[in-house]
Image (tube, grey):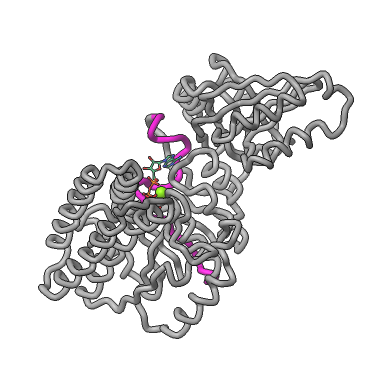
Amino acid sequence: MKVLKFGGTSVGSAQRIKDVAALITRRSGNLVVLSAMSGTTNALVEIADYLYKKNIDGAKETLNNLQAKYAGVVNELLSTQASRQEANKGLADIFNFIRNLAGDIFTIFEEREIVAQGELMSTLLMYLYLKEQGVKVMFLPALDFMRTDKNGEADMTFIESKLRPIIEANPDIEVFLTQGFICRNAYGEIDNLQRGGSDLTASIIGAVLKAEEIEIWTDIDGMHNNDPRFVEGTEPVHELHFEEAAELAYFGAKILHPTCILPAKLNNIPVRLLNTMQPEAKGTVIYNSAPSHTIKAVAAKDNITAIKIKSGRMLLAYGFLRKVFEIFETYKTPIDMVVTSEVGVSVTIDNDRNLDRIVNDLKKFGTVTIEPQMAIICVVGDLEWHNRGFEAKALEALKEIPVRMISYGGSNYNISFLVKQDDKVAALNALSDHLFRQK
Ligand code: ADP
Ligand code: ASP
Ligand code: MG
């Protein structure tokens, strides 16, 4: 069995849903994970935002526009009266459910229920279309099996115990269909796997079912060697190691959700990135045996804050770093980069929610300096330290750009540079010029 995940643009219109249906029925027995149609989750987030602000009119207007869009999709997608009626009834239930949440009390719980509706709508439409086409399709509601534990991690044992018996009992089914992104948490409440989380759903399902492959179908022909939103002429990288893909996803390559590589990697299941709009393109395969001795790609992560703690007390002391890191642990704030010298340590964080409190506590140990609006530029490939010249090449590329921090040697796969966010685009372009365009 393969697990196939289609992102928002891939199911973004009636025609796209039909194209995806043609792709998923090329082979029988696959499990298909769908995102919400593009724009829907953003609209649902906006509706929730209006409701937090008690702007009922704003929420209603956004909701009505969304409902009108779906009415158009139903007419274009479905041809029989019966399936149109079923779709309209299902969608009306969903839109009324959202309207009923617009009460006096609006909390994170209601918000999560609202943002979950996008995937429920896209899978309803795909299900009815496949049925209309005579495909033996089985609907697997994600809220029945996709569960996270108290730490917010996927409860793999529970998921497998729910999913595997259904799959094994239905060998004749041509397409198993489910929602990405949405889940229940340890308390049974509706929750989600964070924005872009449908990739993670696919990887979790692939892992528990020991799938032959996980295919992530999107709007581009694989992982490119640089961010196509900021650099022209980027090219697909056809093979990546799991570790390389994980670094790229974590450091800003939006094509993959940051944590979706881990379940596939742990179970040694190849992940293939493919383009729905160009299904024959080779794409990228992510596995354990990608070629070495090359730099593969560059990615960037924004909104980084650098924090420097300088202290005479660090000199010859032990335990200093532990005390510093404990403060970040207390405020549940992950650290991305770390560099040290004899008199100080600099770290970066991407979540500054507790920055004031962190700084306050750090001041007990030294002089603290903050630099907001920085970006991490991450160069990924075979950067095993015995290889000569790769770090030098990356540094040479950045010679015109002020670099605040450099991190190398944490893994065999990455070298990271911290630059001002304003220099990000220039840095990405300079790296492409030096690393990929000079043959
Ligand atoms: P989906 O909705 O299918 O999940 P996403 O928008 O999440 O799609 O991811 C695909 C997008 O990721 C591409 O359209 C592209 O703009 C962006 N992207 C950023 N970095 C890269 C990269 N290195 N390679 C490919 N795409 C990238
Ligand atoms: N629909 C969700 C989002 O827009 C999940 C996803 O597309 O992966 O973030
Ligand atoms: Mg995505």
Residue 230 shown in magenta = yes
Q: Nearer the viewer, residue 370 or 386?
A: 370
Q: Main secondary structure of the magenta part?
A: loop
For the point 24% across and 56% down, the residue is 16
Judged left or right of residue 108, residue 161 is right
For the point 27% across and 59% down, the residue is 100
Position in image of residue 318 (x %, y %): 87, 32
Position in image of residue 265 (x %, y %): 59, 57
For the point 29% across and 50% down, the residue is 40
Residue 354 visible? The answer is yes
User: Is 16 above or below relative to 168?
Assistant: above
Position in image of residue 331 (x %, y %): 64, 40
Image-quadrant location for residue 72: bottom left
Q: Nearer the viewer, residue 147 or 208?
A: 147
Q: Quarter for ligand 1?
A: top left
Q: Nearer the viewer, residue 398 or 9?
A: 9
Image-quadrant location for residue 387: top right
Q: Start and end of the magenta stretch?
A: 209-231
